[in-house]
Image (cartoon, rainbow, N blue to C red):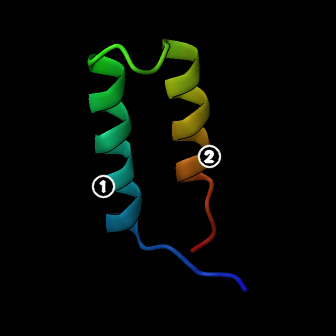
Amino acid sequence: MEIRVADADRERVAEQLRAAAGDGRLTPDELEDRLDAAFGART
């Protein structure tokens, strides 16, 4: 089953990822990888 995501969904996830990186829960490399995955998701 494939679920398509909206731009708002991507932005929400990106915001959460940036917050996690700001809190030290993600390294800069992890943040970059996860943002790439989030923004590469199919719409």
Tell me if residue 15 comes above or below residue 30 in the rendering: below
Taking depth in this image into account, of 42 and 20 the one nearest to the observer is: 20
Residue at point 54%, 50% (across, down): 38
Q: Residues within 10 Å of mark 1 (few under 14, many from 20)?
A: few
Residue 12 - label:
1
- Inspect the image, locate mark 2, and give the three-letter code of the amino acid beneath it: Ala
Residue 28 - label:
none
Q: Which quarter shows the C terminus?
A: bottom right
Q: Between disc 1 and disc 2, whose residue precedes?
A: 1
Indicate left or right for 38 with 7 as reference: right
Residue 37 - label:
2
Indicate left or right for 5 with 20 as reference: right
Q: Which quarter shows the N terminus?
A: bottom right
Residue at point 31%, 66% (across, down): 8
Residue at point 42%, 73% (across, down): 6
Quarter of the image for residue 7 reads bottom left
Where residue 30 appears, x then y in whole percent?
57, 23
Cα distance between the residues tagged 1 and 2:
14 Å
Q: Secondary structure at mark 2?
A: helix
Tell me if residue 12 comes above or below residue 33 in the rendering: below
The furthest residue to the bottom: 1
The furthest residue to the front: 25
